[in-house]
Image: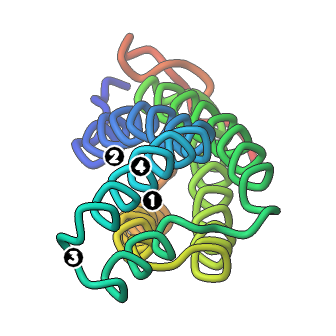
Amino acid sequence: MNSKRPTWVTVIGVLTIIFGIFGIFGTGQIAIMPFVMDFQKDIIDHAVEQARHDRHAPEELLKSIQDMMDYPPWFKSTSVIFGLIGMLISAFYLFAGIWFIQVKPSADKLLIYAISLSILWEIVWASIIGIGLSGFAVFMVIGTLFGFVIDMVLLAVVTMNDRSIFRKSENPIDGNYQLDQQ
């Protein structure tokens, strides 16, 4: 029996590998975000003090700029922890995408688990952002929701297509495989 890997498997595999790599970088950024925000806050505080001294801007504007950079004390550790958890989930996502494109047995289930974990992480992280941040948090939530939509589409494609190729005993690229008796 000679068969090739279905196109949809290749497309989803490549996309999940790409999104897994992006996810590792993005969640790594989340892990270091509080430290970057502290650095930015120091710069903004200095600029605001300079503007107050020189009387270049209205006090309300200066106060709103400073308030935008404030975050609750619990956010720093939460961001680091969730960033690291997100990196692990993204690495699992990447691994599942590689496994999927290689058409390994049960790779479809592994990918469904990885995407589902990613969706759960995105929901929780978007909630934390909404509670913990002000001002620029809207941009972070938009990025997280974009990932959520992508994951939902990928999950739908994987679950709605014929996944019988993942129930075969040998790698289909060789062309020598048999159907498992399950």
Q: Position of residue 116 (x, y in %)?
A: 63, 62
Q: Foreground: 144 or 14?
A: 144
Residue that mark 4 sits on: 46
For residue 123, side relative to residue 29 (left or right): right
Q: Foreground: 42 or 23?
A: 42
- Residue 85, visible in the rendered structure: yes
> Dots 2 and 1: beta carbons under 8 Å?
yes
Q: Position of residue 42 (x, y in %)?
A: 50, 46
The residue under the point 32% across, 55% down is: 50
Mark 4 secondary-structure assignment: helix
Colouring used for the render: rainbow
| Classed neighbour count for the residue bearing mark 1: other residues with Cα under 10 Å, few (<14), some (14–19), many (≥20) | some
The residue under the point 49% across, 52% down is: 41
The residue under the point 41% across, 49% down is: 46
Q: CA distance from mark 3 to mark 1?
A: 54 Å
Q: Which mark is residue 12?
A: 2
- Residue 152, visible in the rendered structure: no
Q: Which mark is in front, 4 or 2? A: 4
Residue that mark 3 sits on: 57
Q: Which mark is residue 21?
A: none
Q: CA distance from mark 4 to mark 2?
A: 48 Å
| Classed neighbour count for the residue bearing mark 3: other residues with Cα under 10 Å, few (<14), some (14–19), many (≥20) | few
Q: CA distance from mark 2 to mark 3?
A: 52 Å
Please identify the residue farthest to the left as the structure is shown: 56
> Dots 4 and 2: beta carbons under 8 Å?
no
Q: Amino acid at mark 3?
A: Ala
Q: Amino acid at mark 1?
A: Val
Q: Position of residue 182 (x, y in %)?
A: 75, 47
| Classed neighbour count for the residue bearing mark 2: other residues with Cα under 10 Å, few (<14), some (14–19), many (≥20) | some
